[in-house]
Image: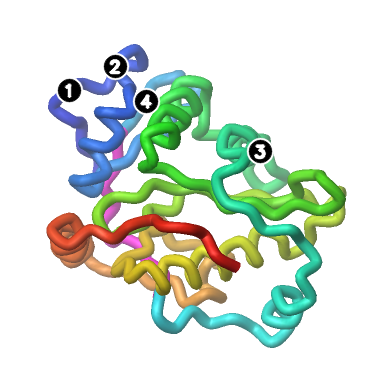
Amino acid sequence: MTRTPEHGDSRTALTPKILLWAYERGIFPMADPETGSIDWYCPDPRAVLPIENLPVSKNLARVVRQQSFAIRCDTAFAEVMQACAQPRIDDPQTWIDETLLDAYCGLHEQGHAHSVEAWKDGTLVGGLYGVHVGSAFCGESMFVRQDLGGTNASKVCLVHLVKHLRQQEFTLLDTQFWNPHLQQFGCVEIPAQRYLNQLHSGLEEPAQWGEFVL
């Protein structure tokens, strides 16, 4: 399902204010790599991850305990977005362009978007970012640099993110679309209306981001 915010969907109109307006209504933008246009989406069904009982494999749990990475929050938001925008072997095109980068960085400066980062020997080797509205965290994208020793780095970031969301009493972790990679973490699809009902409930009782404690 595709929706267009009442403010319009032109590239020049994409601002942090419009982004926040859209996320509060379950809508998010993606750039079309072929046309350069910004399209708006509200998928049905919607994919979500469990916050209270995230499945973590024994191998990943061991990696987390080993503390192979320095995990930080909100110290390199733009760099995380730029890394997520890089072409991948299985997906050479990107839906993150400069217009989106600028708008989300503005949202981050306002405290509505956050990044979780994995560092190794002073180098950013993995991470994720998303938007915080109410008591919902809308995950946008994640990346890993295996060539720099970042194997499992994005997964470790996800584990720490979910721990933080649980501690801060978030009620919803939105991943937008289901994919096989997220299935290992218990990702499921739910009807869009059910998602919107949960989102609206979360807006009425918002959670605070708070201090990111490992």
Q: Nearest to the eye among marks 4 and 2: give it.
A: 2
Across and down, in percent, residue 67 comes to: 76, 70
Residue at numbered disc 3: 83
- Asked if labels 2 and 1 touch by Cβ distance under 8 angstroms, the answer is yes
Left or right placement of residue 213 versus residue 121 in this view: left
Residue 92 seen from this side: no
Across and down, in percent, residue 30 comes to: 41, 34
Camera-nearest residue between 126 and 189: 126
Across and down, in percent, residue 194 comes to: 18, 66
Mark 2 surroundings: few (<14), some (14-19) or many (≥20) residues within 10 A: few
- Asked if labels 3 and 4 touch by Cβ distance under 8 angstroms, the answer is no
Residue displayed at 44% across by 36% down: 108
Mark 1 surroundings: few (<14), some (14-19) or many (≥20) residues within 10 A: few
Mark 4 and mark 3: span between their CA atoms?
Answer: 20 Å
Residue 194 seen from this side: yes
Say above or below: 50 vs 32: below
Mark 1 or mark 3: whose residue is earlier in sequence: 1
Looking at the rendering, the stretch of residues picked out in magenta corresponds to: 40-50
Mark 3 or mark 2: whose residue is earlier in sequence: 2
Mark 4 or mark 2: whose residue is earlier in sequence: 2
Mark 1 and mark 4: span between their CA atoms?
Answer: 13 Å
Residue at numbered disc 1: 7
**In the image, what residue type sits under mark 1?**
His
**In the image, what residue type sits under mark 3?**
Ala
Left or right placement of residue 123 versus residue 58 in this view: right
**In the image, what residue type sits under mark 4?**
Ile
Residue at numbered disc 4: 38
Say above or below: 149 vs 123: below
Q: Quadrant of residue 195?
A: bottom left
**In the image, what residue type sits under mark 2?**
Ala
